[in-house]
Amino acid sequence: MSHNFDPEPGPESPRPQSLWLATTPTTDYEPLEDGLEVDVAVVGGGITGLTAAINLKEAGKTVAVLESDRIVESTTGHTTAKLTSQHGLIYDTLVSQFGPEKAKQYADANEAAIDAVEERIEEHDIDCDFRRTPAYTYAASSADVKRVSEEVETAQRLGLPAEYVAETPLPFETEGAVRFDEQAEFHPRKYLLAVAEAIHGDGCHVFEETQAVDLEPGDPCRVETERGAVVADDVVVATHFPFFDRAGYFSRMHPHRAYLLAVRVEEEPPAGMYYSTASPPATIRTYAAESDRSDREDDDTAADELVLVGGQSHKPSVSGPPTSERYRRCERFARDHFSVESIEYRWSTMDYSPVDKVPFVGQIDPLSEHVYVGTGFNGWGMSGGTAAGMILADLIVEGSSPWADVFDPQRLPPKSSAKSFLEENAVVGGSFVGDRIKSLLSSLGADGGADLPSSGEGKIVRRTGRPMGVYRDEEGSVHAVSAVCPHMGCLVRWNDAERTWDCPCHGSRFTHDGDVLSGPALEGLPYREL
């Protein structure tokens, strides 16, 4: 049975592509050639790495950004693009776990990130659809109203622009919400492509198709790539998941995937950005779009608003509905709450969540004095990644940051997070052991071709005990790769809507031919003969 995403009938089907990628040009920076010496090597070309790099360059440092593929195409290119200090109902939790002083550091860092983006846009005249707007977290049921009210009180004590509202501009009733004023939304690629242009030149570099494969901390440090080594006084590891992981980040944060649709609606879209207290939460925001659909005949749609609707956040796992069903649920939510004319784009994103919900920003481990990390943004990477880039630049240039303490990667998790830490790692361990047992038992079976997938489908099959990921394309050609994730040996799972192999343990993703789409895996899935 095929599970490919099939939206409700309409004049057009959604493009299986991020809106941000579809409306900006592809970059073409040269790869590294031979070796290089700079003050700071920044590994990763997303919002954290580029923000750190531009701040370091402006402070007088020479910088080299190393991106394994194309800049701003991975997680940063698949965001909802909300610049906000409102991260769900988080502040009451932060105060109870870390105390008011560190909770305020978290709040101040994210508020400063919004201001920093706006200041850079104004200073360099960057056209990236930036606009200030309120952000709302609304109660999905009456049972959540008390939590919303408590969040308002805590946020106000921390100096945040929070207030309780009984109603929102949404075209459906809610049970009340916390509103933060003067938040912002923007087009992240338009903004960051301009930042990258400002970085490249005058002794600083942006390198694409340059994968870092190893790192030697020291004085100086040495980053090994497939195209030569970069020697630097300091290194920023700003990959989505740290490619250099001596501190066990794989056990301290877990992946979760969420889904987005960009829809055109009949009614006036609601102003503001929205997040619900439901489980899984829903997310909504608008985007002022200029249509680039060549088949459109109605000139009135040349410039209008799209509504980004999504959610369905979940941890990768063996069980649960297929990816295509997650998209269908997002579509049902959109159609239940808006008068949908068409679905223009659909895409998904992977985020990492630390057990205590606070990103890791600072020295990467106790033994690597000149190596820094920014990771684990818990789904709030636009403000969080910007704040991280600012903090990392300050730590390298000034030796300190007023916000660094709460984000310290070497912090001990609060006692309240210990249960979550144990549960997450038990799930990963269970998946690994279960996969090994299944593989062993299957080795007793006979080989054969009857278990191969149908056209357009992928599945795990085994030959003499070796698990293989097999995909049959629409033309009938079969593609077989190892089904064992090279990161830590878990078995990958087929993503039926995006036609990728995804690891349920730590979130690595691969094309149907086994190439790495996102880490922590650094190597692909090897080709296999059936």
Image (tube, rainbow, N blue to C red):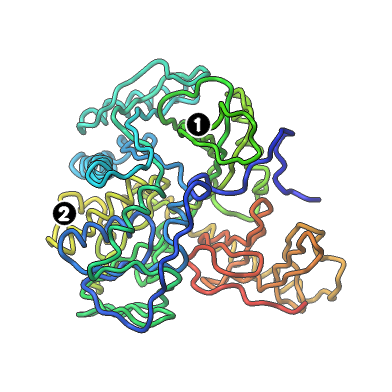
Residue bearing the label numbered 2: 401
Q: Residue at x 39, y 65 (%)?
A: 242
Q: Position of residue 273 (x, y in %)?
A: 41, 31
Q: Determine if residue 99 is in view.
A: no
The residue type indicated by label 2 comes to Ser
Quarter occupied by the C terminus: bottom right
Q: Nearer the viewer, residue 506 or 161?
A: 161
Q: What's the amino acid at mark 1?
A: Ala
Question: Under tag 2, what secondary structure?
Answer: loop
In percent of the image, x 35 and y 42: which residue is there? 127
Q: Residue furthest left?
A: 398
Image quadrant of residue 473? bottom right
Residue 488 location, x and y as percent?
52, 71
Which type of secondary structure does the marked residue at label 1 adopt?
Answer: strand
Name the side, left or right, on which 370 lies relative to 10: left
Name above or below for residue 528 compared with residue 169. below
Residue tagged by mark 1?
303
Vertical placement of residue 279 versus 394, above or below:
above
Q: Residue at x 55, y 20 (%)?
A: 267
Q: Position of residue 78 (x, y in %)?
A: 49, 49
| Residue density around tag 1, few if under 14, some if 14–19, many if 20 or more, within 10 Å | few
Work out whether 345 lies above or below 453: above
Marks 1 and 2, how far apart at CA: 42 Å
Mark 1 or mark 2, earlier in chain: 1
Q: Nearer the viewer, mark 1 or mark 2?
A: 1
